[in-house]
């Protein structure tokens, strides 16, 4: 299994509070991704990173920011959480070698915003 | 908007039967991938088919790709209860998109023992 962990695994918070989700990889890989998964929408890309301090927006980036100060950590921040951000969040990394085009996923973080 | 759309949204079959899921997409692709997601878990990569390939096999999985129709199908033969999961197609548009994938909404497969 790819060494990807996410923390926390579950979080309940209130509207208006800041929330930071962490993705940690042990594969030393360049590309990392944050997705959200909602019923009827599949997985949608929030932000991705192609290296330390190199990030870009995905299709649903409004209300989210990211940071990557080390290769192994990719942080997703909700500056002021809203109920519409209640979702399951997945981190992923791209594969390596011949599996470069594949993605490997973490276990997910279930976030509830009340 | 989603690049891939899966059909059907849900499929229920008996153990031993074959399961076929379809994926349609809108723009040209470099490759198409299928992933499985067990309840409450992350996605797991199953198989990748490149745009210049028409069919690919991996164990009990068979994937076809028709770029003229912008569609792909995933066939699981001799299904087992353990195949119960959601299945997603994902498209890679090529070098201009970096390594990004666009996922469909998924097919929920239930295999009854």
Image (tube, coloured by chain):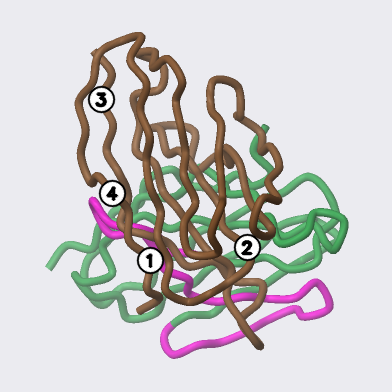
Chain colours: A brown, B green
Name the mark on residue A31: 2
Q: Chain of mark 1?
A: A
Is residue B8 or residue B87 the one in the foreground?
A: B87
Looking at the image, residue B20 lies above or below residue B55: above
SS state under label 3: strand
Task: Pick whichever of labels 2 and 1 is earlier in the sequence.
Answer: 1
Looking at the image, residue A42 lies above or below residue B99: above
Decide: few, some or many residues near mark 1? Use Cα within 10 Å; few <14, some 14-19, many ≥20: many
Where residue B93 appears, as percent x and y from the top left, is: 79, 57
Which portion, as a residue range, is magenta?
Answer: B34-60
Where residue B108 appears, as percent x and y from the top left, is: 35, 50
Residue at numbered disc 3: A112
Task: Pick whichever of labels 3 and 4 is earlier in the sequence.
Answer: 4
Closer to viewer: mark 3 or mark 2: 2
Question: Do the residues under discs 3 and 2 have CB atoms within 8 angstroms?
Answer: no
SS state under label 1: strand
As measured in the structure, the alpha-carbon distance from the residue carrying label 1 to the one carrying label 3 is: 22 Å
């Amino acid at each position: 299994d790819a060494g990807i962990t996410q923390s926390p695994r579950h979080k309940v918070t209130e509207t208006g509070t800041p929330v930071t989700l962490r993705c940690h990889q042990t594969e030393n890989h360049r590309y990392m991704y944050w997705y959200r998964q909602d019923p009827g929408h599949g997985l949608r890309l929030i932000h991705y990173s192609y290296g330390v301090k190199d990030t870009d927006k995905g299709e649903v980036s409004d209300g989210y920011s990211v940071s990557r100060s080390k290769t192994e950590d990719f942080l997703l921040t909700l500056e002021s959480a809203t109920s519409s951000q209640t979702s399951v969040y997945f981190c992923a990394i791209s594969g390596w070698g011949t599996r470069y085009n594949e993605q490997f996923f973490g276990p997910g973080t279930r976030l509830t915003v009340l | 908007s989603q690049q891939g759309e899966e059909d059907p949204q849900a499929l229920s079959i008996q153990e031993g039967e074959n399961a076929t899921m379809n994926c349609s997409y809108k723009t040209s692709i470099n490759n198409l991938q299928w992933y499985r997601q067990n309840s409450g878990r992350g996605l797991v990569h199953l198989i990748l088919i490149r745009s210049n390939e028409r069919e690919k096999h991996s164990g009990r999985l068979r994937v076809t790709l028709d770029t003229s129709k912008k569609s792909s199908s995933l066939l699981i033969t001799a299904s087992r209860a353990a195949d119960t999961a959601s299945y997603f197609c994902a498209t890679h548009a090529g070098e201009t998109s970096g390594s990004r994938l666009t996922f469909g909404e998924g097919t929920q497969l239930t295999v009854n023992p």
